[in-house]
Amino acid sequence: MGGKPSCTLGEIRNRADFLIYWGGNPAECHPRHFTKYSLMPKGKFTPNGRKDRTMVLVDIRETASAKAADIFLQIRPGKDFEALTALRSIVKGKRVEESAVVETGLTMEQLNDLATRMKKAKFGVIFFGMGLSMTRGKHMNSAAAMTLAAELNAFTKFVAMPMRGHGNVTGADVVVRYHTGYPFGVNLSRGYPRFNPGEFSTVDVLVRGDNDATIIIGADPGATMPQPAIDHLASTNTIVLDPKVTHTSRLSKVHITTAATGISAPGTAYRMDEIPMTLRPPLKSPYPTDEEVLRRISEAVARKAAWYPTPEALMAAV
Amino acid sequence: MELTVTKHATCTFCGCVCDDIELHSDGTRVVETKAACILGKSWFLNHDVVRHYPDALVDGQEATLGEAIEAAANYLYEADLPLVYGLSNTTCEAQRQAVTLAEMTGGIIDSHTSL
Ligand code: SF4
């Protein structure tokens, strides 16, 4: 993503003196984040570890992570965009009225204090979780957090980073991006990539019933997606690759058992800061890897006539 | 019982992707983890390489891997608009193959990110 204000977790470990966790509960969802990367480590420019850092937690309720925070700000559900926008104005020295921020559940005093602290930091970071990116406003909230971090660079060094969960979801973004130019929701049906979240994103496609076959790798939407999406998966041709026979496998036409990523399947996974890590699986699986099965499916498709006009077919037609 | 020690193993349970884990395994399952958190520990201890499941299922019936691959290729090839979805709990190498498959079949590729 061009212009994304980001850095590696190693830089945060060695340099960050001001941390904001927004809409996430690392103490329970990313248990080693504090100790390995952000809050506790003694880094090159944070030699006293925890003592050299200030941590703010912004969330809708006081989670287990609040215990680790110096400042806890309880925000009203769904008001993150408003709070981030107010902060952007305050940081730029614009006048913001108390009446404009009451709906966020935060006071002007709290927001002013936070803005001052952000500007005074030597190296600040906003880690934002699914409480920000998956609630009202969704990707606009993530964009607001990133813009705030980018704008703070007029005063000091500031970055923003999503707290990605779900194993190698960061890798999916990176790999799809370097192949197609877009990170997810990419439609290749015209032979070139088109990107339109909301139109080509899975839940929308399934609920509208746009697609007539699905292959699912390393996910179990049957357990999490809305019912109309699941009904569509069940009534069309669905294929599942998974180490276990999942809920989704049971409503599918084809299930193929594969080796478990990082446990019995080797390869690469991306960390949330987009650093690729090598997997060192301790076990050998009796099942093939996802990679092998997908390659063999592609090879089987390649043996059939191409669905698009190939140069050979075009030449034969003239 | 001989235990194999895997040093600097990588945990993929959450986005931290810790790569400093030590695993002790007996060839079938991991019996001990060092440095992993509780989530990582249960992730490693909950997988083994016992054949709990058939190689493949087609229409709910046990099938060989080859049959299942053919069936999958046919469904995707015949479809007007196939969807390739998921990609979280898998490797980058498999993700690359998934992009190839989406391109070959003229489909949509999407991940958990869009949720
Ligand atoms: S050990 Fe814990 S913190 Fe590290 S990747 Fe695994 S689940 Fe995440």
Image (tube, rainbow, N blue to C red):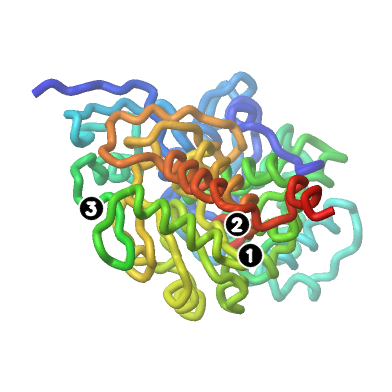
Asked if residue A1 lies left or right of residue B10, the reply is right
Kindly identify the residue that appears in the image at 51 percent across and 63 percent down.
A214
- Residue identifier under label 2: B110
Which is more toward the observer, B87 or B74?
B74
Which is more toward the observer, A94 or A286?
A286
Q: Residues within 10 Å of mark 2 (few under 14, many from 20)?
A: many
Q: Position of residue A100 (x, y in %)?
A: 80, 73
Please indicate, yes or no, whether residue A70 appears anywhere in the rendered image: no
- Residue identifier under label 3: B53
Asked if residue A58 lies left or right of residue A152, the reply is left
Residue A94, image quadrant: bottom right
Circle 2/circle 1 CB separation < 8 Å = yes
Q: Position of residue A253 (x, y in %)?
A: 38, 66
Q: Residues within 10 Å of mark 3 (few under 14, many from 20)?
A: some
Same chain letter for marks 2 and 1: no
Distance Cα–Cα, label 2 vs label 1: 6 Å
- Residue identifier under label 1: A201
Q: Secondary structure at mark 3?
A: loop
Q: Answer above or below: position of A283 versus B100.
A: above
View quadrant of ligand 1: top left
